[in-house]
Amino acid sequence: MNSALVLLVEDELPIRRFLRSALSAEGYRLAEAEEGRQALRLAVQQPPDLVLLDLGLPDMDGQEVLLQLREWLHAPIVVLSARGQEKDKVAALDAGADDYLTKPFSTGELLARIRVALRHAARAGEQESPTFVLDELRVDLSARRVEVRGTEVRLTPLEYKLLTALVRHAGKVLTHRFLLMEVWGPQQAGETHYLRVFMANLRRKIEADPAAPRYLLTEQGVGYRMAAE
């Protein structure tokens, strides 16, 4: 995994140097682009295993680069941006980004997000495992059975559907809209209160401390994420 090819799309030289040093030290191979059009050309010439994409590019908006890449590229795309507003995060995630980090971010957090994104992509490329296990949580998709600390947890059909949507995309931020459409259908895509209520119920049944969740994580104003490590 550490020999993965990362396409870094970033116009600021100091940030590019910093990321080049951090990623090279972890064994990742690197391709670099300062502009959106250059990034699109590089991606076609040598498809990367992961893309780190800044949204504030000089020649075109990073959202457009994201949309064009997502037309054909299945590799994970992690957005790096100084745009911290929720609407920007939601737009990027809905356009196909796998994750979103707001500048400034720590090296440790970035590397952890990269590892999770690459592992998720590797699992998606293989036959999906019927069982998700993380610490004391076990979700057996084939048996439709959920256990915490070896004890079966009884979920309603909608609670189970919500949990499995998160499990199948473990490590990836899923927007409110995506989860609502996945679980309740397009007619309920704006009913975020449904999601809050069901997430609270799930946490009460699964988390040791629902106020400080270990598995079902909130991305404030954006959506939710199932922890992957």
Image (cartoon, grey):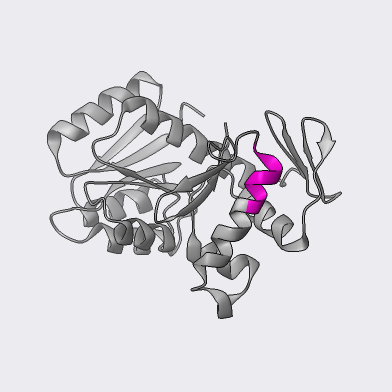
The percent coordinates of residue 110 (x first, y second) are 37, 33
Q: Residue at x 41, y 36 (%)?
A: 5
Pick the front one: 68 or 15: 15
Extreme residue toward the bottom, this view: 187
Occupied quadrant, residue 214: top right
Extreme residue toward the right, this view: 143
Pick the front one: 180 or 49: 180
- On screen, 188 above or below 70? below
The percent coordinates of residue 12 (x first, y second) are 14, 40
Answer left or right for 37 relative to 14.
right
Q: Residue at x 65, y 38 (%)?
A: 207
Q: Residue at x 43, y 65 (%)?
A: 71
Q: Residue at x 63, y 58 (%)?
A: 198
Pick the front one: 165 or 18: 165
The percent coordinates of residue 228 (x first, y second) are 58, 36
The percent coordinates of residue 115 (x first, y second) are 49, 32
Answer left or right for 104 relative to 208.
left
Answer left or right for 96 relative to 102.
right
Q: How many discs mark residues in the rendered view?
A: 0
Q: Which residues are magenta?
A: 201-207
Secondary structure mostly seen in the magenta stretch: helix
Residue 145 appearing in the image:
yes
Pick the front one: 37 or 82: 82
